[in-house]
């Protein structure tokens, strides 16, 4: 009975070693190659009788499993690093942001104007009606102004109510919804 149990335990242990080696062997890279000599060394010692008692064989199997696990982890880390480096190498270069030549100020015909490090554009009350539009007045060029004569603009990178100098004159931020670095003048065109 003891010999049958010994054979079963030995067979299960060998099956575990073979399974671990197969898993480690499927890992790519130099780490998988390094596992095979250790397996061969332990297997040779087991077959030649150098590892006589079950405790020594079990300890050898555990050590082999640890080595294989570490090799598989190293291979996985290397594969992740290689993939990350390949992804960085594949990234397209970022284009510089477009700039517009300075002009006499934003006009309907110009569509966009570059002023003091900002891009000026406009948005129309005919397209997007602001809830406060009735409180503002239209000037003779079609730009909306607040009760103090300041141009009504949207600027997402400035605090609401901020006042600054634009190409048309003094502006007040009363809306958001545009990209950073953009001033959208509210117009009636």
Image (cartoon, rainbow, N blue to C red):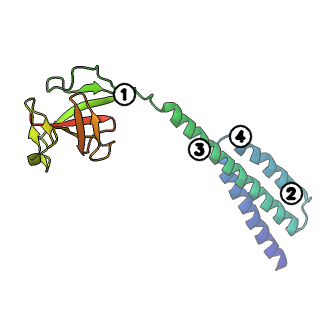
- Position of residue 82 measured from the top left corner of the image (x, y, whole percent): 59, 38
Earlier sequence position, callout 1 versus callout 4: 4
Q: Which mark is residue 80?
A: 3
Q: Residue at x 73, y 42 (%)?
A: 33
**Which numbered disc, 4 or 2, marks the residue closer to the eye?**
4
* Observer able to see residue 126: no
Residue labelled with disc 4: 30
Quick check: 47 above or below 8?
Answer: above
The quarter of the displayed image where residue 136 is located: top left
Q: Which mark is residue 97?
A: 1
Q: Are marks 3 and 1 in contact (CB under 8 Å)?
A: no
The quarter of the displayed image where residue 185 is located: top left
Residue labelled with disc 2: 47
- Position of residue 38 measured from the top left corner of the image (x, y, whole percent): 80, 50
Q: Residue at x 28, y 20 (%)?
A: 102
Earlier sequence position, callout 4 versus callout 2: 4
Q: Residue at x 68, y 47 (%)?
A: 74
Q: CA distance from mark 3 to mark 1?
A: 33 Å
Crowding near the residue tagged with mark 1, few <14, some 14–19, many ≥20 C-alpha atoms within 10 Å:
few
Earlier sequence position, callout 1 versus callout 2: 2
Crowding near the residue tagged with mark 4, few <14, some 14–19, many ≥20 C-alpha atoms within 10 Å:
few
Q: CA distance from mark 4 to mark 3?
A: 15 Å
- Element class at badge 1: loop
Foreground of the two, 17 or 151: 151
**Which numbered disc, 1 or 2, marks the residue closer to the eye?**
1
């Amino acid at each position: 009975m003891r010999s049958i149990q010994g054979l079963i335990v030995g067979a299960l242990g060998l099956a575990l070693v073979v399974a671990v080696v197969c898993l480690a062997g499927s890992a790519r890279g130099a780490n998988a190659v390094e596992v095979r000599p250790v397996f061969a060394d332990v297997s040779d010692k087991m077959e030649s009788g150098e590892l006589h008692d079950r405790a020594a064989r079990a300890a050898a199997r555990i050590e082999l499993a640890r080595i294989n696990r570490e090799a598989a982890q190293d291979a996985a880390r290397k594969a992740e690093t290689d993939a990350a480096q390949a992804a960085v190498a594949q990234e397209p270069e970022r284009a510089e942001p477009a700039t517009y030549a300075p002009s006499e100020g934003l006009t309907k015909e110009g569509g966009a104007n570059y002023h003091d490090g900002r891009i000026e554009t406009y948005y129309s009350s005919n397209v997007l009606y602001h809830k406060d539009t009735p409180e503002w007045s239209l000037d003779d060029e079609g730009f909306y102004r607040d009760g103090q004569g300041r141009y009504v603009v949207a600027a997402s990178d400035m605090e609401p109510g901020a006042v600054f100098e634009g190409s048309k004159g003094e502006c007040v931020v009363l809306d958001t919804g545009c990209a950073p670095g953009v001033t959208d003048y509210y117009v009636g065109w």
